[in-house]
Amino acid sequence: METHNIPVSVDVLRKRFPFLESELISEISKAGEWITVDVNEELMSEGKYIRSFPIVLEGLIRVCRRDDEGREILLYYLNPGQVCAMALTCCMGRMQSNITAYAEEETEIIRIPVDFLDKWMVSYSTWKEFVMYAYRSRFDELLTTIDGIAFKKMDERLVKFFTDRYKATGEAIYTGTHQEIATNLTSSREVISRLLKQLEKSGQIIISRNKIDFSSLV
């Protein structure tokens, strides 16, 4: 993780968040800490207090929930221009984090101290709208995740895993292991490997070493 010694420029913020007031853009530039996060680096951990929250400038963040045995379930992705609603909730309540967040790829964030959250909610209508939209979007994605766990078979969830990644990244190549997919879907590597072989046999994906081409699915 690299912390830059200069603030994010107003021009960069205005381009990424054109709907925010000029005064708010200026405050974000002054208050925020510009950070580059490496691939798979952890931004937030369950059980720790959140004293600042990230807004994504570039890259992709994976937000997960982890059980006592270390297994994870993917909740949602954060794309450029988005903020983590779960982190905001913990910040508002001064609570410990109930999620874990990783950088899925090299990611640029601006980290905002928690004290600015309430202040901007009162002072800037566009900030309030931005936060409320984040809550609604993440809530919808959580409902989709719950529906997938409750009602979809594992092969359907596997296909959805790939289509969701495409929506988040715009890329139809997955670089990672079968175990990593299994972790995200709270399954076993053996089950995922078997289902991947079935998808490959039906011509829906192409598997190579630590790479899966799922362009036929999207």
Image (cartoon, grey):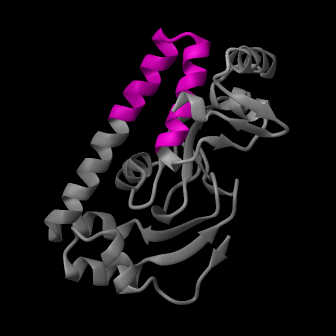
Q: Could you tell me which residue is drawn at 45 percent across and 49 percent down?
A: 95
Q: Is residue 33 visible?
A: yes
Q: Is residue 199 above or below residue 102?
A: above
Q: Quadrant of residue 125?
A: bottom left
Q: Nearer the viewer, residue 104 or 35?
A: 104
Total numbered badges shown on the rendered structure? 0
Q: Is residue 119 above or below residue 93?
A: below
Give residue 206's position: percent from left, percent from top.
73, 30
Q: Nearer the viewer, residue 28 or 185?
A: 185
Q: Residue furthest right?
A: 209
Q: Could you tell me which residue is drawn at 67 percent across and 27 percent down?
A: 205
**Magenta-span inclusion, residue 193:** no
Give residue 47's position: percent from left, percent from top.
59, 45
Q: Residue furthest bottom?
A: 6
Q: Main secondary structure of the magenta part?
A: helix
Q: Quadrant of residue 178?
A: top right
Q: Nearer the viewer, residue 143 or 98?
A: 143
Give residue 44's position: percent from left, percent from top.
58, 53
Q: Is residue 167 left or right of residue 201?
A: left
Give residue 169's position: percent from left, percent from top.
53, 49
Q: Is residue 33 left or right of residue 83?
A: right
Give, as a single range, the part of the protein colored magenta: 140-167
Q: Is residue 27 above or below residue 124?
A: below
**Magenta-span inclusion, residue 155:** yes
Q: Quadrant where the N terminus lies? A: bottom right
Q: Nearer the viewer, residue 1 or 99?
A: 1
